[in-house]
Image: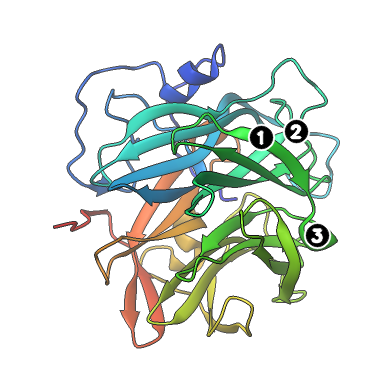
Amino acid sequence: MIQANNRFLTQSLILPAILCAGLTSCTNHHVKEITQTAIWRDTDGNTINAHGGGILYYNNIYYWYGECKGDSTYRLEKVTTWECYRAEAGGVSCYSSRNLLDWKFEGIVLPVAKGDTSSDLHPTNVIERPKVIYNEKTGKFVMWMHIDNDDYTKAMAGVAISNTPVGPFTYLGSFKPGGGDSRDQTIYRDDDGRAYQIASSEWNKTLYISLLNADYTKTTGIYTRNFIDASREAPAVFKRNGKYYIITSACSGWDPNQASYAVADSMLGTWKTIGNPCSGLAADKTFYAQSTFVLQVPGKNGLYIAMFDRWNKTDLIGSRYIWLPVKFANEQIEVPWTDKWKPDLN
């Protein structure tokens, strides 16, 4: 949760689809490279609204799922222990791409429930950090997300499923994995087909890693408690050469802090903390951003992309995206800052 100084164009909250697509449209918008400080636009020229997101690769297409943020940011004054800035939830947006540069808006694949104040998906609630994996046995696309009330005291994991990557997703409900809180979260599907949910728990003091059931819609009750009392959030998990890596953030509200990474021999094993993976400009502040996902690009053994959100706490829809390549030296990683770069998918 990190504040930045840049802002997006003001957008309307009349319809979720209009909000997430933006209001400025021009056809055949083409992106030549990733430019960290730019306003990222989809193929119609509209501002991309997919915060706290992750990417699914399916049938040679990349699908980027993220939080659709409302255009009005406000501070929840009843929360006095931290700066609880909020924006109305607009559901989960989805964009597709074949080259990780040109993103087509596929729509709101998990819409909000505007007329039901009792629903987890009501716009006044929290729908954050959506991630999607595919279950080959069931043929379902499974989405996990952080579900909360406006002051972040509910702390649940929500699950939705779909027959296609572009939805619509059917919401199944929310629960507490392992009986504990579930806030900043991600999911990870391993090579053997087993999947895990990784979430900040115990009021963000401890990170839970939970083994999911066969259809990926529930936890099995098998979980580990990690980084106990270390207060880590914003987990991003990936694997390389049999080693598992996790990048996390410290807990400082929406303000910047230094990232850290750890390595393990198995998801439910012992994690060894190594240190800050970032280097270059503002590395001690994670480039004024926060981790959300690491994409291992299929077919490119050495190409991993670390995704971050550069949060703007007073204008959450105006938060930017930072994507950087991960470099490896033996079992250690580095995420160096670069203003511009282009993923080599050839």
First reached walking from the N terminus: tag 2 or tag 1? 2
Label of residue 171 in the image: 1
Residue at (37%, 51%) from the top-left corner?
A: 57
Label of residue 203 in the image: 3
Type of amino acid at the residue the image marks with label 1: Tyr
Q: Is residue 301 visible?
A: yes
Residue farthest bottom in this picture: 330
Binning the other alpha carbons within 10 Å of mark 3 as few (below 14), some (14 to 19) or many (20 upward) gives some
Q: CA distance from mark 2 to mark 1?
A: 9 Å
First reached walking from the N terminus: tag 3 or tag 1? 1
**In the rendered image, the vertical position of residue 3 relative to residue 127, given as above or below:** below
Q: CA distance from mark 3 to mark 1?
A: 25 Å
Q: Secondary structure at mark 2?
A: loop
Binning the other alpha carbons within 10 Å of mark 2 as few (below 14), some (14 to 19) or many (20 upward) gives many
Say left or right for 52 vs 95.
right
Name the one closer to the observer, 65 or 328: 65
**In the rendered image, the vertical position of residue 55 relative to residue 263, given as above or below:** above
Say left or right for 53 vs 305.
right
Q: Are marks 3 and 2 in contact (CB under 8 Å)?
A: no
- Frontmost of labels 2 and 1 is 1
Q: Are marks 2 and 1 in contact (CB under 8 Å)?
A: yes
**In the rendered image, the vertical position of residue 243 relative to residue 201, given as above or below:** below
Q: CA distance from mark 3 to mark 2?
A: 20 Å
Residue 277 point in image, percent of width and height: 45, 74
- Frontmost of labels 3 and 1 is 1
Q: Quadrant of residue 147?
A: top right
Residue 104 point in image, percent of width and height: 32, 31
